[in-house]
Image (tube, rainbow, N blue to C red):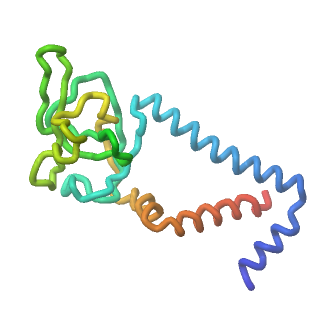
Amino acid sequence: MGWIGEQVDSIKSIQFRQFITQTISLGMIVTSALIIWKGLMCVTGSESPVVVVLSGSMEPGFKRGDILFLHMSKDPIRAGEIVVFNIDGREIPIVHRVIKVHERPDTGEVEVLTKGDNNLGDDRLLYAQGQLWLQRHHVMGRAVGFLPYVGWVTIIMTEKPIIKYILIGALGLLVITSKE
């Protein structure tokens, strides 16, 4: 049976104390990842400091699978900046460029209009019905850096969930059956 048989035998031979120790180690790894994520949220001021580009609408600048690093500051948003925004009623954020900035004369509130670099028209068709501009609360952050193609791991695991479950199961099994 090879490797699988060895892993099953390894699980059978684990003592209770060793099992508890390894389970706690796995819990600490997960907790550490969550703490790092929350720390990044505080440092960047963005509710999602890292996002993956899911479509080709920003090509050639950003390709599908690129990871973007976001930062949200108090500075006004300017035309030409790449922002990530949420639209009311949609779960998945969108990465597009600001093409127009509009300041409301009555309140001084700044609103923006966006467009994907690879799209023909602006994003008003993507916005909620009747919405012509994005307000500041829609914007999650501004792109300040990127890693090309690294996000393909996320895309593959989202599009093919069985791969995600196999990977998580294998990693959990590896942690639990490790000897140290």
Q: Left of 90 or right of it: where is 166?
A: right
Please give the name of the residue rendered at 58% of the width and 37% of the height, measured from the top-left corner: 35
Which residue appears at 45% of the width and 61% of the height?
Answer: 158
Find residue 53 and report its horizontal and vertical position in percent.
32, 53
Q: Position of residue 122 (x, y in %)?
A: 13, 46
- Asked whether 180 or 6 is in front, the reply is 6
- The relative height of residue 98 versus residue 148 in the rendered view (above or below) is above
Q: Is residue 165 left or right of residue 135?
A: right
Residue that extends furthest to the bottom in the rendered view of this protein:
1
The image shows residue 168 at horizontal and vertical percentages of 61, 61
- Which image quarter: residue 137? top left
Q: Residue at x 21, y 29 (%)?
A: 77
In this view, 158 is above or below 98 = below
Provide residue 54's location: percent of width, then percent of height. Answer: 32, 56
Q: Residue furthest top?
A: 106
Q: Report the number of numbered marks.
A: 0
In which quadrant is the N terminus drawn?
Answer: bottom right
Residue drawn at the location 34% of the way across and 30% of the way down: 72
Q: Quadrant of the C terminus?
A: bottom right
